Image (cartoon, grey):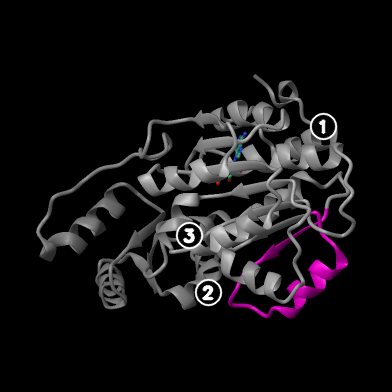
């Protein structure tokens, strides 16, 4: 099946071609036509499956095809657990929506609020954001959710893991009852199911893999090794496998620094990166060290955040 068969507008297909995608991924094949039809979906899809485009493409289609009477107020809200994911979704919307007159903005905490207020006052169709800062802006009466037509929860399981459940419920109470809701989660716990049950209306279940399994593109191996020989094994794997880009997650900052040093002694260029350092220097380090063997240690940020940061790299 090609993208042309999914019912998307030609302008959006141009955006897809621009990205160089040849055919839709399974989640895109299954979700896009159902979303265009206007149905709620409950989608089990992990990062790496193309899930972002599975909702951003039909969202752009819907918003650019259907009229709107809400004036400057946003028509779609995408809730994400982290700023990195919000930025990724925002970028995706920007890329695919190039030929459309759809404005979007990304909202997250930890940065100045004034530019976000300015953006919202200018008027946007799509708001992508993390729950805390969104609630701040709602409290300041800058963000009005009364005209939301499409509500999307991206990585709902992570939002729950991060303790956002109350914020999410608060936000949902401010969104019109009559809306389309798209619910994405990589895993299904009882809590996720309970949340989905209360906010979805006759959803179509869209799944691309069994529940709680790794994405098909990921190979997993387990090495049982005494603690004292872990770094030796890692050095061996990196050297023997000729691995050029490696991310390693450690439990502590201290462990990260120690491991980086040990690898360095074995002739493997490595950097220990902490959460704050990662945001400032991660991309730079990665780019600068591309031609050499290198390993990164990320701690206190989740594998997903790290993955997204890497996905954002520009070579
Ligand atoms: P996601 O699961 O949305 O985080 O996407 C993972 C990666 O797959 C991103 O780098 C996307 O740009 C890429 N991607 C999404 N859809 C396709 C497609 N149909 N063909 C090839 N790559 C894709």
Whichever of callouts 3 and 1 sits on the residue coming sooner in the sequence is: 1
| Residue of label 3 | 165
User: Quick check: is 106 in the magenta stretch?
Assistant: yes
Give the residue pinned by disc 1: 9
Q: What is the CA distance from the residue labelled 2 to the residue labelled 3?
A: 32 Å
User: Which numbered mark, 3 or 1, is in the foreground of this view?
Assistant: 3
Front label number (2 vs 3): 3
Image quarter where the C terminus lies is: bottom right
The region drawn magenta spans 103-125
Determine if the magenta segment contains residue 163: no
x and y percent of residue 79 in the render? 60, 56
First in residue order: circle 1 vs circle 2: 1
Q: Residues within 10 Å of mark 1 (few under 14, many from 20)?
A: some
- Answer with the quarter of the image where residue 145 lies: bottom right
Q: Secondary structure at mark 3?
A: helix
Residue, disc 2: 281
């Amino acid at each position: 099946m090609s993208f042309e068969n999914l019912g998307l507008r030609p302008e959006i297909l141009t955006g897809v071609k621009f990205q160089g995608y040849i055919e839709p991924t399974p989640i895109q094949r299954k979700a896009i036509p159902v979303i265009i039809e206007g149905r709620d979906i409950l989608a089990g899809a992990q990062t790496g499956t193309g899930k972002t485009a599975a909702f951003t493409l039909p969202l752009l289609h819907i918003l650019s095809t259907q009229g709107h009477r809400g004036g400057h107020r946003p028509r779609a809200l995408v809730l994400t657990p982290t700023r990195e994911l919000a930025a990724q979704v925002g970028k995706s919307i920007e890329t695919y929506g190039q030929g459309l007159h759809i404005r979007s903005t990304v909202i997250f905490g930890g940065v100045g609020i004034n530019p976000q207020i300015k953006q919202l006052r200018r008027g946007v169709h799509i708001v992508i954001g993390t729950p805390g800062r969104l609630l701040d802006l709602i409290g300041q009466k800058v963000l009005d959710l009364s005209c939301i037509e499409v509500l999307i929860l991206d990585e709902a399981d992570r939002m729950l893991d991060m303790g956002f459940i109350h914020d999410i419920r608060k936000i949902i109470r401010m969104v019109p009852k009559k809306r389309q809701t798209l619910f994405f989660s990589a895993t299904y716990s009882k809590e996720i199911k309970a949340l989905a049950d209360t906010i979805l209306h006759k959803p179509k279940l869209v799944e691309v893999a069994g529940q709680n399994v790794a994405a098909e593109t990921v190979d997993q191996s387990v090495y049982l090794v005494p603690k004292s020989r872990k770094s030796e094994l890692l050095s061996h794997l990196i050297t023997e496998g000729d691995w050029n880009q490696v991310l390693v997650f450690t439990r502590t900052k201290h462990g990260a620094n120690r491991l980086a040093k040990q690898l360095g002694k074995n002739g493997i260029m490595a950097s220990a990166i902490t959460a704050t350092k990662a945001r400032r220097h991660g991309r730079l380090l990665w780019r600068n060290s591309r031609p050499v063997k290198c390993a990164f240690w990320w701690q206190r940020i989740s594998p997903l955040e790290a993955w997204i940061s890497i996905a954002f790299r520009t070579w």
